Amino acid sequence: MLTALSIRDVVLIEALDLEFDDGLSVLTGETGAGKSILLDSLGLALGARADSGLVRQGADRAKVTASFAAPPEGSPLARLLLDNEIEHEPGEPLVIRRTVKADGGSRAHLADQPCSAALLREVGRHLVEIHGQHDDRGLLNPGGHRALLDTFGRCDTAPVAAAHKAWAAARTQLETARDERDEAERDREWLDHAVGELEALSPEAGEEQALAEERAGMQAGERIAEDLDAIRAVFEGSDGGLAQLRGAARRLDRVAEGHEMLAQALEALDRAVIEASEAEEKLNVAAEALSFEPARLDAVETRLFELRAIARKHQVEPDALPELLEKLAAKLDALEGGAASIAKLEAAEAKAAAHYAEAADALTQARMACGGRLDKSVAGELAPLKLDAARFQTMVGELPPEQWGPRGKDHVEFLISTNPGAPFAPLAKIASGGELSRFILALKVALAEEGGAETIIFDEIDRGVGGAVASAIGERLSRLSRRRQLLAVTHSPQVAATGANHFFIAKSSDGTVTRTGVHELGADERRQEIARMLSGAEVTDEARAQADRLLEKV
């Protein structure tokens, strides 16, 4: 709901601050007083094109600030703000500010955060509907007619949405299976060769690393083998170093008795024999550990190179070869059992499609029944609005199959015929300006439960009518305002009298500068304004009495 509107330096408005209540607010004033400026200012705040011509002469910028009641948590508007990362405190008014510079630049702020004009327009569609002679939104947009009909008739689309989701999932599974089969068929010869090659190789996970480590160990042993053989030759044989040490120890033992120094030398020699024996033993152990068979090295290298070569061929790591074999084998198997599998998926898809069609057909029948009730409801509103020759029809037709979706397979559009025998056609293509506004009012009254924008503005909905028709318009606006906040720009005293709040728009001049002002009328002022609307420039006592009678009816 619009709660406040602040305008600075827009065309003829220098400074204006208005507050609005719920219910029906009417705006009146003499022709040319500037009612359109007020609507243009609100339109600017709601994302309309920023025209530098809106800036008041002599000012460097124009600014409009509009405040709206806080959107309920979880509402479409609240979700829209969240999706666009607009931070807004729950329960706080939603403030929109738009500034236009005289040089053409503009800025937009939503809840004190910079935003695009496109986002303002999207937000504005949730906040305000403006219905005038040149309006091309809201009820004139066939894209929203299906949702309006569903809301009017309380048509439950949940079963159709669930059936569509299941159908889409079955269709996706079938399409995936067919794609895999077709791909496998194209590559059957390659698959046969690749699977046979991998099965012959029989790769194992972790095998490449184990082979590489074994190969590295054997290569290291090969390099050390020659040095070990040379070292061991020093120890081995009758002429080896260890044999000579032992011989020297035996000779020294025979002559060392009684000679202290020789005894010490013998002890040292005995220790050397012991250490040399240990060294020989450890060399033998090492040689045994590092020994390898050249044939084994050849086998390891051959296996390692084969693994790496086929991995490069398939552009995977060697450890991924077992998984690749399993995947390719599954594709090959799918060619054998694919026909049965696809037949099963085709049956499931057909069943899901039939279930969707059944649910969608039921929804279509419900919509057609609701459309009939809506036609009658609108028809009941047309005659009092001097549209008794017109007919209204809710057209429910079938969309092309590629456009069927979670809300069914129906195209819904509101059509009218303004003259007997004339064909039905879309609202905007047939109705004149005054007729269009009254058709929209009739629709709005019939769709009173529809959860659209909280604020609806009717711009001169009573153009070209008076008397009983104007009274009927006023009565319907009043009825509609029990569910929505309404603002009506009107020239009709009958409509003006039905308002809960009355704003008067006037233009004044000091000889050099012309200004437009707006103020809310009190009871006596309102009586005088309605009397002026009834009698013209000269307000008579009879006009005042007639104004009293109009106000008493409210």
Image (tube, grey):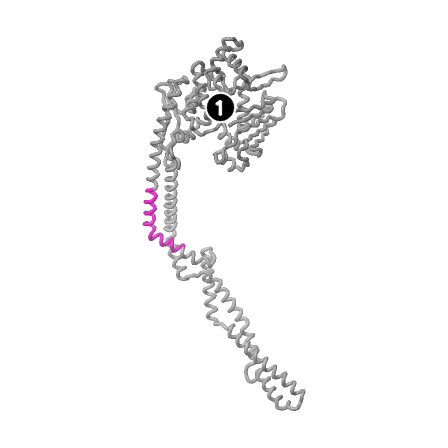
Front-most of 226 and 52? 52
Q: Amino acid at mark 1?
A: Gly
Asked if the stretch drawn in magenta spans residue 352, the answer is no
Q: Residues within 10 Å of mark 1 (few under 14, many from 20)?
A: many
Relative height, residue 156 to residue 257 (above, below): above
The reply, left or right, for residue 216 in relation to residue 412 is right
The x, y position of residue 18, in whole percent, is 56, 23
The reply, left or right, for residue 506 in relation to residue 400 is right
Front-most of 295 and 134? 134
Answer with the quarter of the image where residue 14 lies. Answer: top right
The reply, left or right, for residue 358 in relation to residue 538 is left
* Residue marked by disc 1: 23
The residue depicted at 41 percent of the width and 57 percent of the height is 325
Q: Which residues are magenta?
A: 327-351
Front-most of 385 and 210? 385
For the question of whether residue 405 can be seen, the reply is no
For the question of whether residue 466 can be seen, the reply is yes
